[in-house]
Image (cartoon, rainbow, N blue to C red):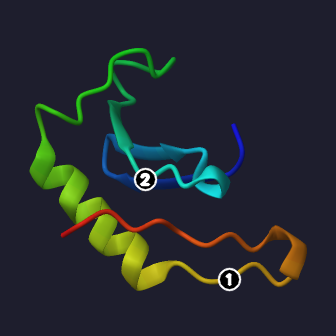
């Protein structure tokens, strides 16, 4: 995978893989019950995924090393 975005709200962790290749699908895990992140709950909790994207939009900053910067393929709102 090339590039990751992650955000956490309480026991939920949102993870976007392959950001450098245009990936913008967020997986959602309840890490207290699924520490190995094997059961994606994103389809069952779209409201949590939407809130996590709001947080990423508000808080994401560019990496200080330009080589590490990646354009984010933001999902449709």
Which residue is drawn at the image coordinates 69% and 36% (left, top)? 1
Q: Depth check: give the residue in front, 48 or 9.
A: 48
Q: Nearer the viewer, mark 2 or mark 1?
A: 2
| Left or right of 45 on screen, residue 61 | right
- The secondary structure type at the circle numbered 2 is loop
Q: Which mark is residue 37?
A: none
Looking at the picture, does residue 56 appear above or below residue 41?
A: below
| Left or right of 13 on screen, residue 41 | left
**Residue 50's quadrant in the figure?**
bottom left
Which residue is drawn at the image coordinates 36% and 27% (left, top)? 32
Q: Position of residue 3 (x, y in %)?
A: 68, 51
Q: Residues within 10 Å of mark 2 (few under 14, many from 20)?
A: many
Give the CA separation, mark 2 to mark 1: 17 Å
Q: Position of residue 77 (x, y in %)?
A: 18, 70
Looking at the picture, does residue 42 appear above or below residue 76?
A: above
Which residue is drawn at the image coordinates 75% and 74% (left, top)? 69
Residue at numbered disc 2: 24
Q: Position of residue 43 (x, y in %)?
A: 16, 33
Q: Earlier in the sequence, mark 2 or mark 1?
A: 2
- The secondary structure type at the circle numbered 1 is loop
Residue at numbered disc 1: 62
Label count reads: 2
């Amino acid at each position: 995978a090339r590039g990751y975005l992650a955000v956490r709200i309480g026991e939920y962790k949102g993870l976007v893989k392959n950001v450098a290749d245009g990936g913008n699908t967020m997986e959602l895990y309840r890490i207290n019950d699924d520490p190995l992140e094997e059961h994606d709950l994103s389809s069952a909790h779209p409201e949590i995924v939407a809130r996590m994207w709001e947080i990423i939009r508000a808080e994401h900053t560019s990496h200080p090393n330009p080589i590490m910067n990646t354009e984010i393929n933001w999902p449709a709102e």
